[in-house]
Image (cartoon, grey):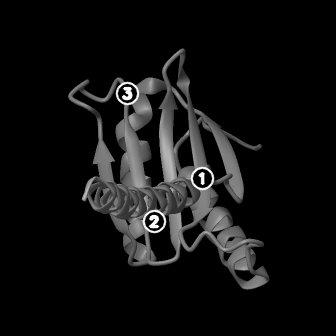
Amino acid sequence: MLGNQRRLLLIMFLFLLLLFMSGCFINMKRVIEIASDNREQLPIRSLRITIDPSQREDFFEQLQKFADKHAFDFKLSDYGTGGANFLVEILSEDIEILAVDIPKAPEMISVRFYDRRRSTPVSEETMDVINELAIDLENYIMEIPEITILEQ
């Protein structure tokens, strides 16, 4: 009888171990999926804009006009800083454009273009669309006097 109890305990232990191991495997699989989804994406195109901080409202207006022309969503957040720090998101289904201030250089703004589909490699068609959008955005921004745009 003692041998039967040990066998039963061993079988229960192995069963619980098997359940535990399968749960760990499923959780590790999910961790890997999440990590791969959050890989850092590099911008396809990047601009560095030099602008007088007093012209930021003009800059935001030009970004809004650009977004409206292309039927993109426009989101502006200044994190409650009154415009001292900001993030502008211009979004379509396929393209994401981010404009962000550079805190240690208030006269500098970084604008980056991304493929929201995260295709690797980025398709030639997406590259062409982003290049056309970048040129159009530059034209809007250049309407602001005394502004400098550099390709990064």
In front of the other: label 3 or label 1? 1
Considering depth in this image, is 47 or 8 the residue closer to the camera?
8
Task: Give me the residue at 63% from left, 56% from top.
Answer: 138
Q: Sequence-wise, which precedes: disc 2 or disc 3?
A: 2
Task: Give me the residue at 48% from left, 38% from top.
Answer: 100
Give above or below for 136 relative to 142: below
Give above or below for 93 relative to 141: below
Considering depth in this image, is 7 or 99 the residue closer to the camera?
7
Which structural element holds mark 1? loop
Amino acid bearing label 2: Phe
Amino acid bearing label 1: Arg
Dot 1 corresponds to which residue? Answer: 39
Which structural element holds mark 3? loop
Amino acid bearing label 3: Asn
Quadrant location of the N terminus? Answer: bottom left
Dot 2 corresponds to which residue? Answer: 66
Q: Tag 2: Cα neighbours inside 10 Å, few (<14), some, or many (≥20)?
A: many
